[in-house]
Amino acid sequence: MENTKIKKALITGITGQDGSYLAELLLSKGYEVHGIIRRSSTFNTSRIDHIYQDLHTSGARLFLHLGDLTDMGNVQRIISEIKPDEIYHLGAQSHVRVSFDMPEYTANTDALGTLRVLEAIRNSGLPIKFYNAASSEMFGSTPPPQNEVTPFHPRSPYAVAKVFSFDMTRLYREAYGMFACNGILFNHESPRRGEAFVTRKITRGIARIKAGLDKKIYLGNLDARRDWGFAPEYVEAMYLMLQQETPDDYVIATGETHSVKEFLEETFRYAGLGDYKNYVEIDPRYFRPAEVESLIGDANKAKGKLGWEAKVKFTDLCKIMVDSDARQVVRQMNLQAPGGGDRVIQEKFTNKWWRND
């Protein structure tokens, strides 16, 4: 019987939203998955803990390694020891507003971090396929729609660092013949999105308001327009890029744009809370020094070459996220209730207590 080699994948940023979904996808395809996590005084593996719980029955292989993208020696050692077939580089300081407060750290992690991984691959001499997580923020103030040939005009330290990362990935592909791809992913959300990002701030806020825990949600610019997709679908595109015969760069998007205000209207309507203006207050601290007004991705190249197309659109995405945060708030309330559970809360949850339809 022919011995089939098990593919190895290394994921930087495995504990993030995309990293956790990508790990699940690769494990389902029989990969041995390795992930780099930063040393922290608290556990930050909540998005992948459930994977470990399933390992003993599924036989899947998942290994975590302490590392940091700001440490070249560490990055090089991990790659040389694992000898992965594919590297998915998702690790970054990914919050745009925070990048204005921490520009040097953002550049060191997001720009130079990518360069360190590329150099480590080149120095290893191994035929490693490399995926770099680029960002629609690179387009900045360039008018939409945006595709693979649209000029970049970044409007934040985060976006500038991502342009550097994008160009370095392309340079190493052209200069050294590396199989290196850029995925220019437009905004993609899910129940695993970080709570500091605007979509989760809204849906988590809605759940807490309905449960009587909060009264207000504090936000910044409501007029910013984004192309919002569903994260589990977007990690499938990452995988497909590294399965092609030749490396290339791809825009991944839904082709639709909606404002933060529209996101508020749709989620508040679905939750039965009425006019969002009764619950939302504008906080100037959340405004960016330089705003990106509108992003709309043209993913025709990905559709034609990868066979990839977004299926979950805006309205369904809103429902998925509101439902998830409602369930999460109920679980938290049940755990905090006397005796370890509250029958009334659980019954309300069963009947979708947070909706009025």
Image: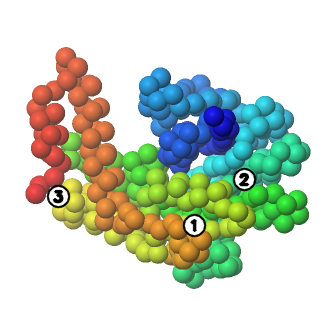
Residue at 16% over, 52% down: 355
Residue 279 visible in the current orientation: yes
Q: Relative to 162, is 335 above or below? A: above
Residue at 57% over, 82% down: 143
Sequence-wise, which precedes: disc 3 or disc 1? 3
Residue at 21% over, 56% down: 271
Compute the Cα span from label 2 to label 1: 16 Å
Q: Secondary structure at mark 1?
A: helix
Residue type (three-letter) at the residue carrying disc 2:
Phe
Front position among marks 2 and 3: 2
Circle number at residue 169: none
Front position among marks 2 and 1: 1
Residue 8 at x, y percent in the picture: 67, 39
Circle number at residue 306: 1
> In the drawing, does residue 326 fall left or right of residue 232?
left
Residue type (three-letter) at the residue carrying disc 3:
Gly
Q: Secondary structure at mark 3?
A: loop
Q: Secondary structure at mark 2?
A: strand
Residue type (three-letter) at the residue carrying disc 1:
Leu
Residue 6 at x, y percent in the picture: 65, 37
* Residue matched to label 2: 130
Using the image as rendered, state which of residue 162 and residue 241 is in the foreground: 241
* Residue matched to label 3: 272
